[in-house]
Amino acid sequence: QVQLVESGGGLVQTGGSLRLSCAASRSIFSINDMGWYRQAPGEQRELVATITSAGVTNYADSVKGRFTISRDNPKNMVYLQMNSLKPEDTAVYYCHAIWMGFQSWGQGTQVTVSS
């Protein structure tokens, strides 16, 4: 099992930037897929970005060119750099890990983008 703790959310104006961090409770070397999802009020949770252990990334079309996912395996950390934020990016952002048939979610961090 792995516990995930997100941080870095907050209130930012349109066009601003935030960097989300996800701290894992153990080594993530063996975790193939880690990612970020988000859920806005009244909406379903949706994929934002994922990154494999080999560094292969995948992004939702809505964030391509604005968001960058990265991972630091020795520090057991995953990051999401969010630039050019828009009001529609407002949501709770969740860190996610999947490995060997298991998965784990963080508790989420709120991101609010004001217009």
Image (cartoon, rainbow, N blue to C red):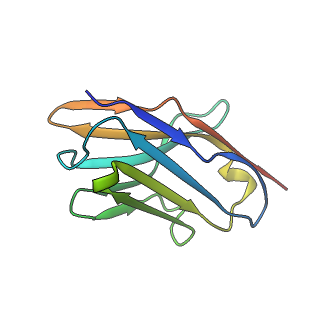
Q: Quadrant of the C terminus?
A: bottom right
Q: Is residue 16 above or below residue 28?
A: below
Instruction: Judge from the rendering whether residue 95 lies leftward or rightward of residue 20; answer left or right.
Output: left
Residue 99: quarter of image: top left
Instruction: Judge from the rendering whether residue 99 lies leftward or rightward of residue 59; answer left or right.
Output: left
- Count the numbered circles shown: 0
Instruction: Judge from the rendering whether residue 38 lies leftward or rightward of residue 16; answer left or right.
Output: left
Residue 13 drawn at (x, y percent)? 81, 58
Residue 71 drawn at (x, y percent)? 36, 58
User: Which residue appears farthest toward the bottom when viewing the image?
Assistant: 65
Q: Residue at x 17, y 46 (%)?
A: 30
Q: Residue at x 36, y 30 (%)?
A: 3
Residue 4: quarter of image: top left
Q: Residue at x 42, y 42 (%)?
A: 23
Residue 5 drawn at (x, y percent)? 47, 35
Q: Residue at x 50, y 49 (%)?
A: 21
